[in-house]
Image (cartoon, rainbow, N blue to C red):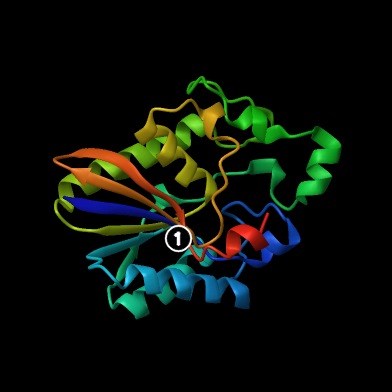
Amino acid sequence: MSLIIFMRHGQANNNVKKLLVGRNLESHLTDLGREQVKHAAGILSTIDIHKIYSSPVIRTVETAEIVSNIVNVPFDTDERLFEIELGKLVGMYYDDLLNTHGDLFVKFYSDNDDDNSLLEFEVESFGAVKKRVSEILKEITIKHKNENVLLVSHLDPIKAAISLIMNLKPSSVYSIQVPNASLNIFKNVNNIVSLCGINIMDIRRFLLEY
């Protein structure tokens, strides 16, 4: 038995500004974000973490560096954990997007994996995100059998993992919140992976954040 733990990066400047940066515009962790990560790393330090993989984006790398130093485990980057490609939406403020185009991300969570409703904006489809997340999950269950692995990633790849493991339609995970630096924990028993913990973090944050 082992654990596969998805961790979202800590709060970054783009989260505060509500700016869409995707994987192409870099945004560093805020001071609060670093504190969030340290708290999560404290939780992780109560078990043996054998390997850490991180998205190559700077906010996830900074998150992985903090955790790595606290749990004393090195990390590697893996592009399958990348933030979604936001194409022409990069650089837009979320409120401006809503005012101009409506909530496009309702369309992003299409229940048809072969559909890309945001193709005109050159946005990666949720089906494509699920495919790359599925690939890394399959690899980890084999390569790290009986080892606890931490994957530092972003909102939508984590939702993709939940959708895959719980066999949920993408539209069903649209409204799931994944706070910064929260831990979503999957248990691997004989290569059967199940969700056993969602959004683990300082419980006070549930009252303070929205």
195 relative position to 99: left or right: left
Horizontal and vertical percent position of residue 190:
13, 40
Amino acid type at circle 1 is Pro
Horizontal and vertical percent position of residue 103:
74, 34
**How packed is label 1: few (under 14 Cα within 10 Å), some, or many (20 or more)?**
many
Q: Quadrant of residue 148?
A: bottom left
Residue 138 appears in the rendering: yes
Horizontal and vertical percent position of residue 67:
39, 73
Residue farthest along the right direction in this orientation: 99
Image point (43%, 34%), residue name: 163
Q: Quadrant of residue 56?
A: bottom left
Image point (51%, 52%), residue name: 154
Q: Name the residue under label 1.
A: 56
15 relative position to 188: left or right: right
Residue 118 appears in the rendering: no
Q: Nearer the viewer, residue 121 or 169?
A: 169
Q: Nearer the viewer, residue 179 or 95?
A: 179
Horizontal and vertical percent position of residue 40:
44, 68
